[in-house]
Image (cartoon, grey):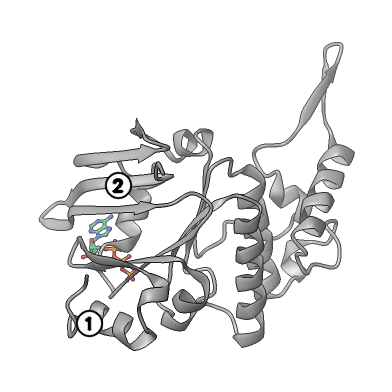
Amino acid sequence: MTAKIEIRDLKKTFGSVQALRGASLSAQPGEITAIVGDNGAGKSTLIKNLTGVYTPDEGEILIDGRPVRFHSPLEARAAGIETVYQDLALADQLSVWQNMYLSRELTAKIGPIGFLRRKAMREEAHRLVSSLAVNVPSVTKSVKRLSGGQRQAVAIARGVMWAKSVLVLDEPTAALGLRETAQVEALIKRVVEGGTTVLVISHNFEQVMRLSQQVWVMRAGQVVGGTRTSEVTGEQLVGMVTGTIAAA
Ligand SMILES: Nc1ncnc2c1ncn2[C@@H]1O[C@H](COP(=O)(O)OP(=O)(O)OP(=O)(O)O)[C@@H](O)[C@H]1O
């Protein structure tokens, strides 16, 4: 099967820091693929090369077997790759549906006059939020009135709405309590059931064991190993990250 994402020998240097020293990994379509590794291992830099924030110094990225080279996040978005970063990038004063269409509003024209298709956006946002069973009271509710878990769910729903191909999640539950974490994990599973491929960075090993089908381990700018998640235990995974167990 052609991988949805294939990253080959990626290198990225910032001044004297070699953040990526030839990192390679792949993600299969319709799966949740996790990236784990200690602070500074290069996880964020890797995904930022995939999502157009950085352009690699060397190496190759293939989506559905075709090489891509993004020069901006907009280019990655246009190729169907959406990212939810830890800061979520929600506009607090706007409603759920307005956030879902932020900077990508639906517009129409009658003669020379352009206008926003507010009803269409609201209805479509409502349809998606309902189909993903996102736990928000209403899409007209202001985002600042939502809980941390609800805000994360809105950011993920927005990503799903626009992700034609891949959804990248950077620490999706880092700021959440146990109950909200469980809700967001359930949402991520529904996202994948809908056919979107998910790549997730997580420091939470138990979460990686619960959610992912494939996990890659990064250390010092390289992907030092990868395994089907069903073939390792949580303890083995911790050992692979800290280096006490050789990563496969
Ligand atoms: N924009 C930048 N300028 C200079 N150095 C950077 C930049 N971004 C990352 N680095 C460095 O590259 C290395 C990898 O950082 P990166 O953020 O990718 O690691 P990470 O695995 O995501 O870590 P964390 O889990 O702490 O987020 C680190 O040494 C970091 O200091």
Q: How many marks?
A: 2
Tell me the element at label 1: helix
Q: Residue at x 77, y 28 (%)?
A: 107
Tell me the element at label 2: strand
209 horizontally vs 43: left or right: right
148 horizontally vs 126: left or right: left
The reply to whether residue 197 is visible in this rendering is yes
x and y percentages locating residue 15 in the rendered image: 14, 52
Q: Quadrant of residue 217?
A: bottom left
Mark 1 beta carbon near ligand 1 (under 8 Å): no
Residue at the disc numbered 1: 242
x and y percentages locating residue 96 in the rendered image: 76, 56
Q: Which numbered marker is on residue 7?
A: 2
Q: Amino acid at mark 2?
A: Ile
Q: Which quadrant is home to the N terminus?
A: top left
Q: Dot 2: within a 10 Å radius of its alpha carbon, few (fewer than 14), some, or many (20 or more) residues?
A: many
Q: Amino acid at mark 1?
A: Thr
Who comes first in sequence, dot 2 or dot 1? 2
Q: Which quadrant is home to the C terminus?
A: bottom left
The reply to whether residue 90 is visible in this rendering is no
Against 47, residue 213 (above or below) is below
Q: Residue at x 79, y 56 (%)?
A: 131
Q: Residue at x 74, y 59 (%)?
A: 132
Q: Quadrant of residue 221?
A: bottom left
Against 205, residue 222 (above or below) is above
Give the camera-side residue of 141 and 188. Answer: 188
Separation of residues labelled 2 and 1 (CA atoms): 23 Å
Q: Residue at x 64, y 39 (%)?
A: 103
x and y percentages locating residue 145 in the rendered image: 77, 70
